[in-house]
């Protein structure tokens, strides 16, 4: 085929055969908004309701990691046994969230908590960087220096 003729045909974007209308501009599809609308329509069919005033959601994994949502949008449909949690998610270690998360721990996470407690006990395995090499020896008697 003639290269000039091929270039001419490539320049004309046709939606059909000969005699059809040439497209002036290529349509750009926005998939993220359509996916979101489709999801919202499906959730509406399930009958989910917004649950207000939830400050955080934590999803515990088997490997000791926690998926943490701070101020999420939570929707639920009890009849369909469906819960939707949307928002900014962070994956953190269980140790990072520990002081305020103890009341949320269930029996599944009890083994992980015991493992962490063993590492912090004096008889447990040493924590990395906890050697006494960095601490200098006591040289002087500070009580006599303070009295004089």
Image (spheres, rainbow, N blue to C red):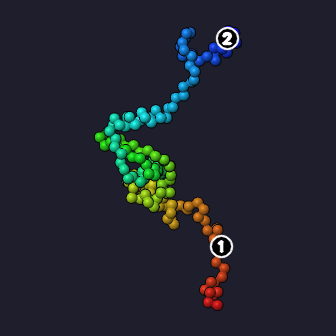
Closer to the eye: label 2 or 1: 2
Q: How many discs mark residues in the rendered view? A: 2
Residue at the (55%, 10%) spot, across then down = 19
CB contact under 8 Å: marks 2 and 1: no
Q: Going from the N terminus, do you reach mark 2 or mark 1 first? A: 2
Q: Label for residue 5?
A: 2
Where does residue 102 sit, x and y in percent of width and height? 41, 59
Q: Label for residue 73?
A: none
Graded by Cα atoms within 10 Å as few (under 14), some (14 to 19) or many (20 or more), the crowding at tag 1 reads few
Mark 1 = which residue?
A: 136
Residue 32, can we see it?
yes
Residue at the (45%, 61%) spot, across then down = 99
Relative to 18, 98 lies left or right: left
Where does residue 22 sit, x and y in percent of width and height? 57, 16
The front one of 60 and 108 is 60
Where does residue 15 sit, x and y in percent of width and height? 54, 16
Quarter of the figure with the N terminus: top right
Q: Tell me the SS state at disc 2.
A: helix
The front one of 107 and 9 is 9
Q: CA distance from mark 2 to mark 1?
A: 86 Å
Residue at the (50%, 63%) spot, across then down = 120
Residue 60, can we see it?
no
Relative to 137, 85 lies left or right: left
Q: Tell me the SS state at disc 1.
A: loop
């Amino acid at each position: 085929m003639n290269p000039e003729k091929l270039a001419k045909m490539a320049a004309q974007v046709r939606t059909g055969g000969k005699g059809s209308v040439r497209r002036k501009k290529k349509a750009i599809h926005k998939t993220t908004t359509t996916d979101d609308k489709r999801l919202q329509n499906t959730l509406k069919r399930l009958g989910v309701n917004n649950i207000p005033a939830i400050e955080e959601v934590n999803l515990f994994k088997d490997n000791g990691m926690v998926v943490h949502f701070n101020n999420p949008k939570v929707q639920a449909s009890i009849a369909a046994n469906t819960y939707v949690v949307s928002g900014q998610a962070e994956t953190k270690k269980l140790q990072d969230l520990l002081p305020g998360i103890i009341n949320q721990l269930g029996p599944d996470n009890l083994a992980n908590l015991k493992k962490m407690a063993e590492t912090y006990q004096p008889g447990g395995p040493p924590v990395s960087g906890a050697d006494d090499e960095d601490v200098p020896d006591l040289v002087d008697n500070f009580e006599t220096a303070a009295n004089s």
